[in-house]
Image: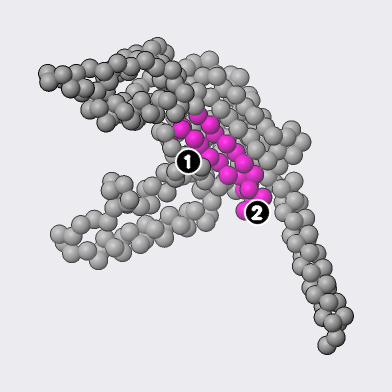
């Protein structure tokens, strides 16, 4: 085979690969327009209408580093963003959970106080603090005075490759990130109702109700593996636990580190 024939074969192969890729992308675009795009617009419209109708306060609780659990933070300052009214790929609901008043928190020991101070600094929460000492005049901790607030975000992002919408929550269920993939054809009136109750903190199972088939299968396999391990243990064996030492690994599927 001469050099020209070799070059021609390579050019033909590259052209066929490009044509296949263009056909694949065209099919994904058709799927987006037929299913994902209408679902994104539904979510955007629902969020606009729902937040416009809220009249009663929605309260939340959070575990703060060093400080511990704080109740009665109010959700407020709702803001809805969409990257394109015509072909949306990302819809975002942002709000804050804010304490109603400034309070003082006594944080001990000093290591926990340092952790709380670092967290508040990173979150740009204005605060004042002063040390208090034990009977030996050693610094035992801090008194921190501040009005706690937590920025929260729910993001709905088109995942065209997987034919669905990636739903992510940041700082909603604690100071962490959770996400799942919702198939576009599952986003109907019932799904939107569940989303609404989730935002109102009246449905903490929203994410698990909208799992993709792949993720449901993943959880099923993990549960079966967990059962096999448990059954293989002797009567006085130690139960397999997750990385945090508090339960099976499948319970932590959504407790992913923030991006």
Height in image: 149 above or below 177? above
The residue sitting at 33% across, 50% down in the picture is: 243
Answer with the quarter of the image where residue 110 lies: top left
Q: CA distance from mark 1 to mark 2?
A: 22 Å
The residue sitting at 53% across, 55% down in the picture is: 213
Question: How many discs appear?
Answer: 2
Answer with the quarter of the image where residue 157 lies: top right
Height in image: 106 above or below 211? above
**How far from the left and from the top, in percent, is residue 45?**
66, 29
Answer with the quarter of the image where residue 40 lies: top right
Height in image: 222 above or below 54? below
Query: For this view, does 185 lie left or right of residue 172?
Result: right
Regarding mark 1 in the picture, which secondary structure is present there?
loop
Q: Nearer the viewer, mark 1 or mark 2?
A: 1
* Circle number at residue 100: none
Magenta range is 152-173
Label pair 1/2, CB-CB below 8 angstroms: no
- 160 and 99: which one is in front? 99
- Does the magenta stretch mainly form a helix, a strand or a loop? strand
Residue on which disc 2 sits: 161
Residue on which disc 1 sits: 258
Nearest to N terminus: mark 1 or mark 2: 2
Does residue 255 appear in the picture of this structure? yes
**How far from the left and from the top, in percent, is residue 234?**
18, 64
- 116 and 18: which one is in front? 116
**How far from the left and from the top, in percent, is residue 1?**
83, 88
């Amino acid at each position: 085979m001469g050099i020209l024939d070799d070059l021609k074969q390579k050019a033909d192969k590259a052209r066929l690969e490009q044509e296949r890729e263009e056909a694949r992308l065209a099919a994904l675009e058709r799927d987006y327009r037929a299913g994902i795009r209408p679902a994104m617009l539904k979510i955007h419209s629902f969020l606009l209408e729902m937040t416009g109708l809220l009249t009663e306060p929605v309260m939340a609780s959070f575990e703060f580093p060093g400080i511990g659990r704080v109740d009665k933070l109010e959700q407020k300052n709702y803001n809805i963003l969409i990257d394109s009214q015509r072909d949306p790929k990302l819809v975002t609901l942002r709000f804050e959970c804010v304490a109603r008043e400034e309070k003082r928190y006594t944080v001990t020991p000093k290591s926990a106080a340092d952790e709380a101070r670092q967290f508040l600094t990173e979150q740009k929460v204005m605060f004042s603090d002063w040390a208090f000492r034990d009977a030996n005049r050693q610094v035992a901790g801090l008194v921190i005075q501040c009005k706690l607030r937590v920025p929260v975000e729910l993001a709905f992002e088109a995942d065209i490759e997987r034919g669905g919408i990636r739903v992510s929550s940041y700082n909603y269920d604690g100071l962490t990130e959770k996400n799942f993939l919702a198939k576009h054809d599952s986003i109907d009136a019932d799904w939107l109702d569940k989303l609404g109750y989730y935002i109102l903190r009246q449905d903490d199972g929203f994410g698990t109700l909208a799992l993709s088939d792949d993720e449901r299968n993943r959880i099923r396999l993990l549960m079966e593996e967990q059962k096999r391990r448990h059954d293989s243990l002797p009567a006085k064996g130690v139960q397999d636990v997750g990385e945090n030492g508090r339960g099976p690994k499948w319970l932590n599927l959504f407790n992913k580190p923030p991006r």
